Amino acid sequence: MEPAARSGGGGGVATSKFAVPRRRPDVVRRPRLNALIDSTIGGKGILIAAPAGYGKTTLAVDWLQTTDFSTAWLSLDAWDAELSAFARALAGAILKSLDVDAQLGDSRFWQPRTVSTAIINAIADLDDYVILVLDDIHTVEASVEVMETLGYLLERAPENLHLVLTSRTRPPVPSLSRLVARREVAVIGAADLAFTPREVRELLASLGHAVSEDEAEALFEHTEGWAAALILDAGARARREERRSAAGRCRGRVAERCRSRRQRSGSPSRRSRRGAH
């Protein structure tokens, strides 16, 4: 008979998936969004959903640094898009970060409800308020069983659990629409994540490019506040500035050579040689 599965070590799951990504020093803090996430505490969770390049993971990481809650982080990928892999990864994350073992039992009998119930009960026994971040939910949305597990986890989340989900899409979690309608789960979308003109100035300043209010407004209109486009624009600006600087240095060297030649051609020794001919 197969031994009971223990979450310890993640059962072959890379432990790097449990690490909260480092916050880059050039990341601009976004108090309005942090405050929005703060306002959802006490509810079941929040979904941060937008296409690539909108700063979903960056926001989650930045917000975590403003809280004192116990946190478990799981970076998902396509390998987790089946129930057994997802269950092991999820149990491994809470063991690694919260030092609590979810009693998953015999893996032959794992079902969405049994897996989510084991996670719920393990966290409910804790005294701490827990933030569970599941990053890149879109990578596992093709699995009906994983979506059902998430749905039950959201629906039956204990009072001391708050889920933060990031995704490029609105995942087909069965209970999600109902929980959003009840305002038990909040949603931050692309429109919320878009940088305001003021944030555009702050972002570009952090990248070493000061712009005026009018320039920031124009960039906002052009990119619709999309972070990736703003960063690309900053890179393009840097390359243009470097080309202008290089061109200026080149012109300076050419001018210096011309002056040097004129000075040599006008020197007494050169004039005397020409006269001798």
Image (tube, helix red, strand yellow):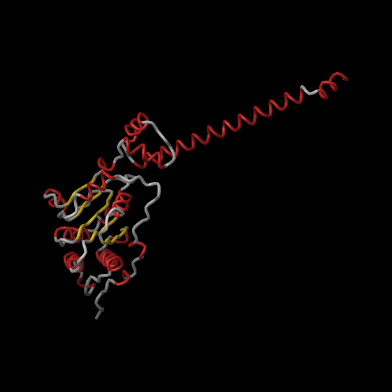
Q: Is residue 236 left or right of residue 101?
A: right
Q: Is residue 62 left or right of residue 175?
A: right
Q: Is residue 174 above or below residue 102?
A: above
Query: Could you say where residue 84 lies in the image, as x and y percent from the top left?
Result: 26, 67
Q: Nearer the viewer, residue 150 or 67?
A: 67
Q: Residue furthest top?
A: 275
Q: Quadrant of residue 161?
A: bottom left
Query: Could you say where residue 207 lies in the image, as x and y percent from the top left?
Result: 42, 42
On-image quarter of the N terminus? bottom left
Q: Is residue 96 left or right of residue 155?
A: right
Residue at 76% x, 26% y is 264
On-image quarter of the C terminus? top right
Residue at 32% x, 32% y is 221
Q: Is residue 58 above or below residue 130?
A: above
Residue at 30% x, 60% y is 74
Q: Nearer the viewer, residue 273 or 47?
A: 273
